[in-house]
């Protein structure tokens, strides 16, 4: 390995650990149909089990979102890996619905602990002058890990034995290896304080941020809601409406949305934040339209296209929203404002999904999906119209 490679190795190892943890949060996605067959619950229950994850993330962001600045990055990452391991154990021991709720809640806690701490750690570990490249490593680890979860579980469920057990056993091994890696990486917080000094972070929205925050939060909410529906409902739609029962295909379709999001986020640097947010809204609208077409005409090709286009739109919109909100915030309140944006985004990944589950019984999966698409289209159109009337400042 050359000198540059050795300098970047700690940053890349930190990114790998980040990806392993995030993969665990989406690992059950292609397996929900198998759990339905085993435990006999409804589509509404699937969406509630999925949404419990987001409530765990939101709880950590509000109560301990700044913990790694206080107790150190490695400590928080080890807590997160502990929650990820406990989540996998819950799924391995699952004999009823309660185990699935516990597993998803622990998974949300692990993601909440990792989201801020691992991003900061990856950037801390980068060589001097490598902030831009480190941001890309963190982005790719986050969304790429989320995409690898359903892909790994789908492949193992389809082509290996023990479909409800082997994916979580593999993830436990990866988590154990990640803990060894974290233990060997250096701590980057020089002055650490005890856990008792961690204080809840109250959401904040200063007056000068509100004009930017409204459209940014709306686009973030809609983008995460699209991901929520894709990861919770699309395997059932593929199986029931399109007769696609291959778990590997279900996992791949979901993974494509996350991989496309990674591509969209990496394109923001070339497009510029000012143009990326309205372009992301336009791509989200196109993704929603393609998903509506897939539901209406029962087309697998349109499902794939909606994953790619909608995922890219989510990536463009969310990274642009994050950048715009961060720049508009006063430095002393920036972390609290960003935390507020994440709370809105993760509300988007949970509440609309439960709404789709509630509507599935009276309207069917296709009807519920079309109602969801109509509501999200109104939100995205509103945000896009506002941005066309009042574009972000040119300096953003």
Image: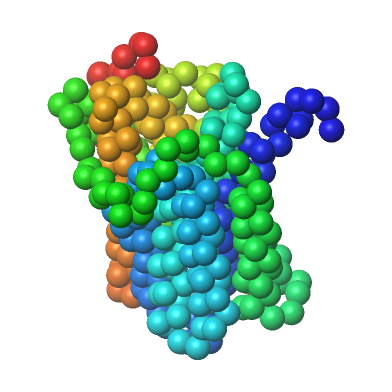
Height in image: 121 above or below 227? above
Task: State the colouring used for the structure image.
Answer: rainbow
Between 125 and 233, the one nearer to me in the picture: 125
Residue 82 x/y as whole percent: 52, 64
Residue 221 in sight in this render = no
Residue 209 x/y as whole percent: 22, 26
Please state if 56 lies on the left or on the right of 210 as rendered.
Answer: right
Residue that appears at 36% across and 70% down? 48
Between 302 and 78, the one nearer to me in the picture: 78
Height in image: 155 above or below 94? above
Quarter of the picture containing the N terminus is top right
Residue that appears at 47% across and 18% down? 272
Residue that appears at 52% across and 48% down? 74
Picture quadrant where residue 46 is located? bottom left
* Residue extending furthest toward the left: 207
Height in image: 361 above or below 111? below
Residue 155 in sight in this render = yes
Please state if 337 lies on the left or on the right of 121 as rendered.
Answer: left
């Amino acid at each position: 390995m050359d000198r540059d490679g050795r300098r970047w190795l700690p940053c890349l190892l930190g990114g790998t650990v980040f990806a392993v943890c995030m993969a665990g949060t989406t690992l059950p996605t292609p397996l929900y149909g198998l759990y339905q067959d085993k435990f006999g619950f409804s589509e509404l229950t699937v969406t509630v089990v999925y949404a419990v994850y987001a409530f765990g993330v939101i709880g950590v962001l509000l109560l301990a979102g700044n913990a790694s600045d206080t107790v150190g990055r490695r400590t928080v990452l080890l807590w997160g890996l502990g929650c990820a391991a406990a989540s996998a154990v819950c799924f391995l021991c699952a004999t009823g619905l309660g185990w699935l709720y516990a597993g998803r809640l622990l998974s949300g806690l692990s993601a909440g602990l990792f989201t801020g701490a691992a991003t900061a750690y990856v950037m801390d570990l980068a060589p001097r002058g490598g902030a831009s490249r480190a941001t890309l490593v963190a982005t790719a680890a986050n969304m790429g890990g989320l995409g690898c979860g359903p892909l790994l579980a789908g492949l193992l469920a389809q082509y290996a034995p023990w479909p409800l057990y082997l994916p979580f056993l593999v993830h436990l091994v990866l988590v154990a290896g990640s803990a060894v890696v974290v233990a060997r990486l250096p701590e980057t917080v020089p002055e650490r304080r005890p856990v008792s000094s961690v204080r809840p972070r109250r959401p904040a929205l200063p007056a000068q941020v509100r004009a930017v925050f409204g459209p940014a939060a709306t686009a973030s909410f809609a983008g995460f809601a699209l991901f929520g529906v894709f990861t919770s409902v699309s395997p059932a739609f593929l199986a029931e409406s399109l007769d696609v029962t291959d778990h590997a295909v279900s996992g791949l379709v979901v993974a494509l949305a996350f991989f496309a999001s990674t591509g969209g986020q990496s394109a923001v640097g070339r497009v510029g934040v000012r143009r990326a947010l309205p372009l992301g809204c336009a791509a989200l609208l196109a993704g929603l339209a393609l998903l509506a077409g897939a539901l209406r005409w029962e087309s697998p090709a349109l499902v794939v296209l909606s994953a790619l286009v909608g995922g890219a739109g989510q990536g463009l919109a969310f990274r642009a929203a994050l950048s715009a909100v961060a720049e508009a915030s006063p430095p002393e309140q920036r972390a609290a404002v960003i935390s507020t944006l994440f709370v809105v985004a993760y509300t988007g990944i949970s509440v609309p999904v439960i709404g789709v589950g509630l509507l599935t019984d009276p309207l069917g999966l296709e009807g519920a999906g079309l109602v969801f698409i109509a509501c999200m289209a109104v939100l995205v159109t509103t945000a896009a119209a506002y941005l066309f009337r009042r574009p972000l400042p040119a300096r953003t």
